[in-house]
Amino acid sequence: MGLTIELPSAGLLGIAGAQAFQISSNTTLSDNSIYVLDGSNNFTITLTAAPADGSTILVKRIGTATITVATALIEGSSQSLTITNNQPIRFTYINSSVGYLMT
């Protein structure tokens, strides 16, 4: 189940009209969405396989689980990531050469 975040909230995050989801299990993420990663059981998230240039995904871990980002083209290299802290991460898809840029 998703929540629609209306402006100005989504606008402040830079993702106008974004859907917001709280997840605690393996999930494939959608473009232009916000995800709260919750829970204590470790799980894997998968970035969108064929995103549009400029699409954004924002994730924020709030639980104690270790979150694995499945292998994807991130900053020009095919790699996976592990999220173990509660810092927000913004994945913005640049193009098929760079893939996702993390900020």
Image (cartoon, helix red, strand yellow):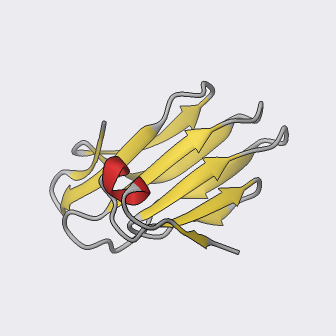
- Residue closest to the far top: 85
Q: Nearer the viewer, residue 74 or 16?
A: 16
Residue 50 percent across, percent down from the top left: 34, 74
Residue at 25%, 42% (x, y): give it: 75
Farthest front residue in view = 8
Q: Indicate left or right for 97 with 81 as reference.
A: left
Above or below, comparing residue 45 to residue 27 in the picture: above
Residue furthest right as drawn: 40
How far from the left and from the top, in percent, is residue 8?
37, 58
User: Which residue is depicted at the point 60% across and 55% down?
Assistant: 45
Quarter of the rendering occupied by the C terminus: top left
Quadrant assignment, res 38: top right
Q: Quadrant of the N terminus?
A: bottom right
Q: Measured from the top left, where is residue 59 in percent x and y?
A: 51, 47
How far from the left and from the top, in percent, is residue 89? 43, 39
Q: Residue at x 58, y 33 (%)?
A: 83
**55 to the left or right of 79:** left
Identified at 61% across, 43% down, the residue is 68
For the image shown, how many numbered marks are present on the structure?
A: 0
Question: Is 4 placed left or right of 36 in the picture?
Answer: left
